[in-house]
Image: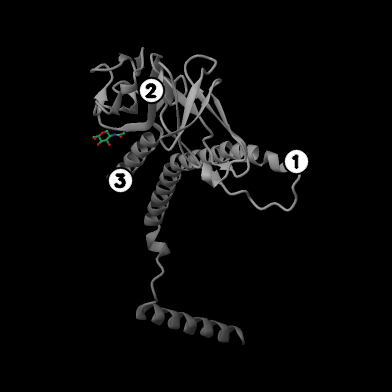
Amino acid sequence: MDPTSLQRLVFLTSLLSCSTNQARLTVTPSSSQVFKYKPVSLRCEDASDGWTVRRNTSIDNRAECGVGWGRPARSSCTISYCDPLDSGVYWCESTEGSTSNTITITVSAVFLQSPVLPVIEGDDVTLICRTKMADPPSADFYKDGVSIRTESDGHMTLLHVNRSDEGLYKCSIQNEGESPESRLSVSEKPPTTTMDPSTSSSSSSSTMNAPTTLSSLHLVFRLLRHLVVFCPYCICTYIVVSLYRERARGNDSVSMTMTPPTHAEQRLDVDYDDVMSAVTTEHQF
Ligand SMILES: *[C@@H]1O[C@H](CO)[C@@H](O)[C@H](O)[C@H]1NC(C)=O
């Protein structure tokens, strides 16, 4: 094997190892919403040594775990008592500057639990004002900054929502604080011919579809990743086979070349024909 193809092989191998060695940031407990004073643990998975957790917040910029925030341990980082100032974007970074996925964490004493997906016109929607206590206490609800209702059990139900219910909602609990705002989107009801009980399940089917789409997307991504890993092997095999064939062809080049016949060869052919005809005529006797 000549040096250039060896270089190509080394390049493809390094490409291969790069595509499979990518760190991933995970968070425990597995939620982007963290209650104030609760702990959170961030871990760089599939990472070798030298990867650290970094963050951007309203007060930090690319701040490394252990420098002003968090307690580092190998490739993970723990915040024992989260504060609203810990809200921000977190990621893993290697000493060479490679980065992982990012996770956005919001810390608050109060969260408004609302549907993530658009709700369908005509559905009933319940918004729940949550604190770290299991049962929500009495809460005030706001829409687009305006107080709309107070509910003693922390649950606000909007009956038969329509487009006018769209907006930014938040809630507040006395002595605890306010939740971050959440957007409620209402999508038009898909046209149906009959009004049977199945219409009530339309919203649940739309919420069921999202994970399936996500998992199929994940599947496609995994397939692509495997292809990326598999391709260099195919290319290497192709290079090796073509090199081998090139060498084999190089050895028999004398007998295998297909150049157009030269005048000398043509004359030889003519001579050969003459001889043959002479032989055949001789045999005719
Ligand atoms: C963090 O902040 C820096 C400087 O503002 C910015 O360049 C970088 O893109 C931010 N990183 C993330 C993951 O948001």
Q: Are marks 3 and 2 in contact (CB under 8 Å)?
A: no
Numbered disc 3: secondary structure? loop
Numbered disc 2: secondary structure? strand
- Amino acid carrying mark 3 in the image: Asp
In this orientation, does residue 23 appear? no
For disc 1, the marked residue is 197
- Give residue 205's mark: none
- Give residue 2's mark: 3
Instruction: Kindly report the distance in space between the C-alpha atoms of the residues bearing marks 1 and 3.
Output: 73 Å
- Amino acid carrying mark 2 in the image: Val
Mark nearest the camera among 1 and 3 is: 1
Ligand 1 in which quarter = top left
Dot 1 crowding, Cα within 10 Å, few <14, some 14–19, many 20+: few
- Amino acid carrying mark 1 in the image: Pro
Q: Residue at x 33, y 28 (%)?
A: 88
Q: Quadrant of the N terminus?
A: top left
Q: First in sequence: mark 1 or mark 3?
A: 3
Q: In x, y percent, where is residue 281?
A: 57, 87
For disc 2, the marked residue is 107
- The reply, left or right, for residue 225 in relation to residue 122 is left
Compare residues 90 and 203 and report the one nearer the observer.
Answer: 203
Dot 3 crowding, Cα within 10 Å, few <14, some 14–19, many 20+: few
In this orientation, does residue 200 appear? yes
Q: In x, y percent, where is residue 14?
A: 34, 37
Dot 2 crowding, Cα within 10 Å, few <14, some 14–19, many 20+: many
Q: Residue at x 41, y 63 (%)?
A: 255
Compare residues 14 and 273 and report the one nearer the observer.
Answer: 14
Q: Quadrant of the C terminus?
A: bottom right
Q: First in sequence: mark 3 or mark 2?
A: 3
Q: In x, y percent, where is residue 131?
A: 47, 18
Q: Residue at x 39, y 26 (%)?
A: 106
